[in-house]
Amino acid sequence: MGVALFDMDRTLVRRETASLYVRSRRDRGLGSWRDTARVAWWVAQYTLGVIDAPDVASRALMVLAGTKESDVEQECEVLFRKYILPHIGERARVAVAHHKARGDQMAIVTGASPYVARPVADYFGIEHVVASDLEVVEGELTGRPVEPLCYGVGKVIRTNRLAREAGFDLREAMFYSDSYTDLPLLEAVSHPVAVNPDMRLKRVAEARGWPVEIW
């Protein structure tokens, strides 16, 4: 039995779920085109690897302060069905089915929140989710993330926690990702796979002989 780890945005899902979330709020009259532009700017910074992730997370999460966790969970279920599901490609389904048939342990490892990631994991039948947890006090979000964010080296730290809990060796895992910012985790596993890679990751993958796939 092996271990397969999947990034979510632009890997299992062809789009950035943050952009889809903002679009869903705008469609319901809860957001503006300014919000859309701001998220697009953050996504561009993320793609270029120049984003200040903790600062962006702090600013983005402020709008959720005082929101009931149960309301966020319900909102993200609707987000998945209406906005995320149409952007899941067939090759992602085939890859997950392949690992499931082998009996591999699987996890989504994403910088997004678990509220966004869990419906995606449930759809694929993926047991584990490693994500950027949000602080909750008395059933309400505080608008603050729980450190470390699931980003860069933080992804390695959080995935190592899962490895200890689930009883697998991270060094023997596969990890599918699109982003150069995931290089720390890609380097920590034995089988890195670049999926829909950004230009910097594509160059690294080609130089190191890593598989490159388009989903």
Image (cartoon, grey):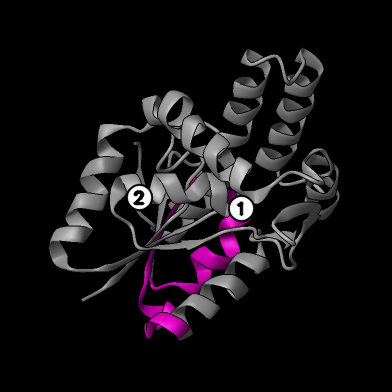
The segment highlighted magenta reads 165-190
The residue at 47%/46% (across/down) is 8
Q: CA distance from mark 2 to mark 1?
A: 17 Å
* Residues at marks 2 and 1 touching, judged by CB atoms closer than 8 Å: no
| Residue most extreme to the left | 101
Residue 53's x, y, as percent?
77, 51
Q: Which dot marks residue 53?
A: none
Label 2 SS: helix
Frontmost of labels 2 and 1 is 2
Q: Amino acid at mark 1?
A: Gly
Which quarter of the picture shows residue 19? top right
Of 196 and 89, which appears nearest the observer?
89
Residue indicated by mark 1: 111
Residue 9 pos. (x, y %)? 51, 41
Along the viewing direction, whichever of 144 and 67 lies nearer the viewer: 67
Q: Up-down: is 130 above or below 26? A: below
Is the residue marked by circle 2 packed among few (<14), some (14-19), or many (20+) residues within 10 Å? Answer: few
Residue appearing at x 62%, y 21% in the figure: 23
Relative to residue 191, is residue 15 drawn left or right? right
Residue denoted by label 2: 122
The kind of secondary structure element at disc 1 is loop
| Residue pictured at 54% horizontal, 79% vertical | 161
Magenta stretch: includes residue 181: yes
Nearest the viewer among 195 and 20 is: 20
Q: Residue 215's spot in the image, x, y percent?
A: 34, 36
- Residue lying farthest to the front in this orientation: 138
Horizontal side, residue 44 vs residue 207: left or right: right
- Between 194 and 61, the one lying in front of the other is 61
Mark 2: amino acid: Asp
> In the rendered image, which quarter is residue 38 located in?
top right
